[in-house]
Amino acid sequence: MAHPNHWTSNGGRPIGGRTIVFDLDGVIADASHRQHFLAAERFSDKDWDGFFNACVDDPVIEPGHRLVGAISDDFCVVILTARIHETREKTVAWLSANDVRHDWLILRGHRQGGPSTEWKREQLELLQEAGADIELALDDDPRNIVMLRDSGLAAMYVHSGYYDDRDDGVEFR
């Protein structure tokens, strides 16, 4: 299967086999200093460009960094982030500078907007079609955890605090 052009390999390991999927912001990268860009109530008033462009200044979340680094080489590690395509160079540079272990990076492709849950579900399905046996996914968005579990995947919630002030009525099952 040809991989979508918004999937970036880190060394040429093929997609397939035992796979663990990590979200980036809130799990490995601390985006708390960028949250003010999203403080507007209306979606159209949020400063998404400012939010994404400030990703170069993210500190590492040490427990997430240690966890991804501790994953056996028997697993393919995929970072699945809703960051936009335009941050690819910045994100790849950040991952390299912070020595974040991963085999694949998946960002939103050009013009792939919409809710994170829908976009991530599509990417997970493509990963599975490419031969990935997803054994675990980690995310900090409660809505994504519900989506992952509803999709039959094992999911681990990582509390980032980014979603504490949002009353989405999400309940974990």
Image (spheres, rainbow, N blue to C red):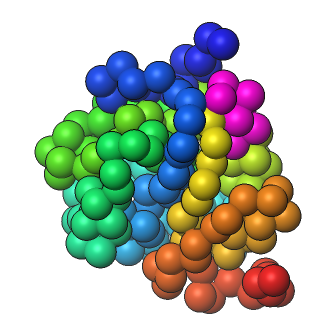
Relative to 142, say whether 79 is above or below.
above
In the rendered image, residue 7, in percent from the top left (x then y), is placed at 51, 27
Q: Is residue 128 magenta?
A: yes
Q: Is residue 58 left or right of residue 84?
A: left
In the rendered image, residue 103, in percent from the top left (x then y), is placed at 38, 35
Q: Is residue 173 left or right of residue 159?
A: right
Image quarter of residue 152: bottom right
Residue at the far top in the pictured view:
2
> Which residue lies at the image location 56% right of the left edge and 66% below the top edge?
139
Relative to 137, say whether 10 is above or below.
above
Taking depth in this image into account, of 74 and 25 the one nearest to the observer is 74
In the rendered image, residue 109, in percent from the top left (x then y), is placed at 60, 29
Q: Is residue 106 magenta?
A: no
Relative to 45, say whether 105 is above or below.
above
Relative to 93, say whether 29 is above or below.
below
**Magenta span:** 124-131
Q: Is residue 37 left or right of residue 128?
A: left
* Quadrant the C terminus occupies: bottom right
In the rendered image, residue 148, in percent from the top left (x then y), is placed at 73, 61
> Which residue lies at the image location 77% right of the left edge and 66% below the top edge?
149
Tell me if residue 145 can be seen.
Answer: yes
